[in-house]
Image: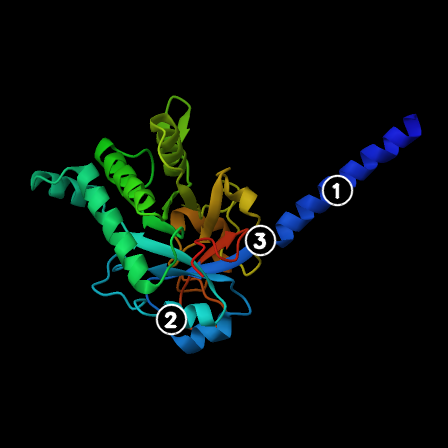
Amino acid sequence: MQVISRKFRWFLLALTMGASTLVHAQGKLGFDRNDYPGDAALRAAKSRFAFTGYWLNNPPGETGNTWVGKRTTVRGMGYGFLILWNGKRDAQIKAAAKRGVKPEQLGKREGTAAVAAAKREGFPAGAVIFVDLEEGGRLLEEQRAYALGWTEAVAAAGYTPGAYCSGQPVDEGGGVHITTAEDISTWVKKLKLHEVVLWVWQDTCAPAGPAPGCVSNAPRLSDSGTQNATVWQFAQSPRRPENTASCAKTYATDGECYVPEMPGIHLDLNVSNSSDPSRGR
């Protein structure tokens, strides 16, 4: 019985090791960028990337959205999706409040608009729509009201709410560190709201952080530092010097992140265990 038990333990260990290797092997590489890269570039990069970001409204800093109407083309090439809605910054939320629009009300309005845009683009019910929250750290009260108003409106309309947010710890003093992702998860649980799918950005390279830099081999999603993340953005264009000094050589000399299949087109790089994190196909 002792011999059988030992063999059984080794069998279980082998299964565990195999499962771990499988999860690593299944990590899928994807990218996102503000501007549509063009049909030819997308086609050329399909051998490298499983999924791409897809904006529903104007991306940050842009006055137009070149992704509109491209879902069928992108889907036809075999890509999965990261469906994105550009959310409001804190200053914008406060400005709306001065006009009499409360943060939660603003979030609900925009969540409803995001769902309407997703439907126009042909994304199916249940697809994950990520609200882009660019400001990191613990959410201020008005930011939280806006973000959770947005996610609840998306859920109420039959889609799955997600948040693109910081997975980079912020030191609040007294030994307390917080990420935006953790803060969102805490409030969702506390208020018993619909679950929010997390797409985290954390581009800090070793030894201070887990990011590998602008590399073509997908890192393990579990290394992101956010336990319940569905997507990890590990490289940004342009690189942030304060976070990437130790991996600067993995980026181009102009500070951007490129891949050979898309020359001259800078990208942000992401990893997920799914080839279609937004379930947008």
Q: Residue at x 51, y 64 (%)?
A: 49
Residue 155 spot, x, y in % from top left: 34, 43
Within-10-Å neighbours for mark 1: few <14, some 14–19, many 20+: few
Q: Residue at x 28, y 43 (%)?
A: 153
- Cα distance in 3D space between marks 3 and 1: 19 Å
Q: In this view, does 115 lie to the left or right of 22?
A: left
Residue 85 spot, x, y in % from top left: 30, 53
Q: In this view, does 19 lie to the left or right of 166?
A: right
The answer to which image quadrant residue 169 occupies is top left
Foreground disc of the pair 2, 1: 1
Q: Are marks 2 and 1 in contact (CB under 8 Å)?
A: no
The three-letter amino acid code for the residue at tag 2 is Pro
User: Element under label 2?
Assistant: loop
The three-letter amino acid code for the residue at tag 3 is Gly
Across the whole image, how many numbered discs are drawn on residues? 3
As displayed, is residue 64 above or below residue 104? below
User: Element under label 1?
Assistant: helix
Foreground disc of the pair 3, 1: 1
| Mark sitting earlier along the chain (3/2) | 3
Within-10-Å neighbours for mark 2: few <14, some 14–19, many 20+: some
Q: Which residue is label 2 attached to? A: 37
The three-letter amino acid code for the residue at tag 1 is Leu
Q: Which residue is label 3 attached to? A: 27
Q: Quadrant of the C terminus?
A: bottom left
- Cα distance in 3D space between marks 2 and 1: 42 Å
Picture disc at residue 234: none
Picture disc at residue 15: 1
